[in-house]
Image: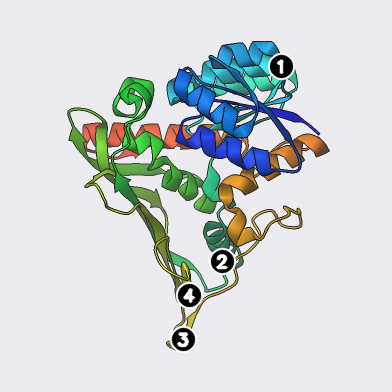
Amino acid sequence: MPKVAVCGVGPMGRMHAQLLKQNEAAELVAIADVQDELRERIGAELQVATYACGEDLIDAGVADVIWICVPTYLHAPLSIRALKSGHHVFCEKPMALNAAECAQMMAAAQAADRMLTVGQVLRFWPEYVFLKKAIEDSTYGRLETLSMIRIGGVTVGWQAWFLDEKLGGTQMFDRHIHDSDMTLWLLGKPTAVTAHGQQRDRGGFVHCFTRYHYPGVCVSAEGSADQPPGFPFTMGYHATFTDGAVHYHSGHTPTLAVYRPDGTIEHPELPNPLGDLHVGLNITSAGGYFLEGVYFLDCIASGRPPQIVSPQSAMDTVRLVRAEIESAKQDGAVVLFS
């Protein structure tokens, strides 16, 4: 059973650590965080060793697999350090600040013969897996339009890093990136993007609208981190096909509905994102964050490189969002992947 450690136990890292503690396929042995009170509290809660920073944890060599859950500007240096020291690495999204750093991470993984994946979690979200299968199988005919949404309140983070574009914390790059990633996963590479956004003095673009250019299908996404306190975080999509429509809204029960041409409304059973891989929990209760961890640990155990989120695909997502930010800044379309 591999020993696992988590670098960074802010909200995301803490969640990953708690899920790994429940995962029967791994042993959580340590965490690291520069915030003294938080580190000691989470360490005591999980009953694991603690380290004052990610570098110390990696250098201690106490784990086989490292979860990198620190601010984005630290993703590349800590991932590369962990890979070079012989660890497999799960890195939270975004993979890194830019494509050049992503390439350095991939080179380090290849040189060390270690596995690397990135937390583009919607690829493990049953409602999005359902949509991918519907598109690929033409279940409801040909896809004509797809609109996605991901909106919520302001995220600040440790030392307000989310609000500093140089540290990688803009809304477009941290939150909206999920829908950008879905665009690539569902439909492949667009020929261009056109993005418009609202900026604030701190935080860069806090609300954006992006059109992804594909022949024969209209695709767009809205992302925000500027809603007032109390506004519920909301994500979803609406996909119109020639023979029906699929609607997902995170605030609805059930979350997924299919609308057919004859007026009937269906609430289909959600698929297992991992296929035949056993997870030990009901899929709807396990959640994408648990499933992505199960998948990566299975890849390590079987010696099979991650395919659901390959490092190359995560780098493509970083390139896409960077093009969206460029488009919003220059107020015009940006051609890419040509």
Q: Nearer the viewer, residue 38 or 146?
A: 38
Report the residue marked by disc 1.
Answer: 111
Residue contact at pointers 2 and 4, CB within 8 angstroms: no
Q: CA distance from mark 3 to mark 1?
A: 55 Å
Mark 4 or 1 closer to N-term?
Answer: 1
Q: What residue is shown with label 3?
A: 264
Report, in whole angstroms, how far the alpha carbon at label 1 lies from the one at label 2: 38 Å
- Residue at coordinates 37% horizontally, 21% vertically from top-left? 167
- The CA distance from mark 4 to mark 3 is 8 Å
Indicate the secondary structure of the residue bearing disc 4: strand
C-alpha separation, residue under disc 2 versus residue under disc 4: 11 Å
Kindly identify which residue carries mark 2.
134
Q: Element at badge 3?
A: loop
Identify residue type, mark 2.
Answer: Ala
Tell which tag, 4 or 1, sits nearer the viewer: 4
- Left or right: where does residue 298 sit relative to residue 42? right
* Rendered location of residue 11, percent (x, y): 46, 36
Residue plotted at (23% across, 41% down): 197
Secondary element at tag 2: helix
The residue that label 4 is drawn on is 258
Q: Quadrant of residue 48?
A: top right
Q: Nearer the viewer, mark 2 or mark 4?
A: 4
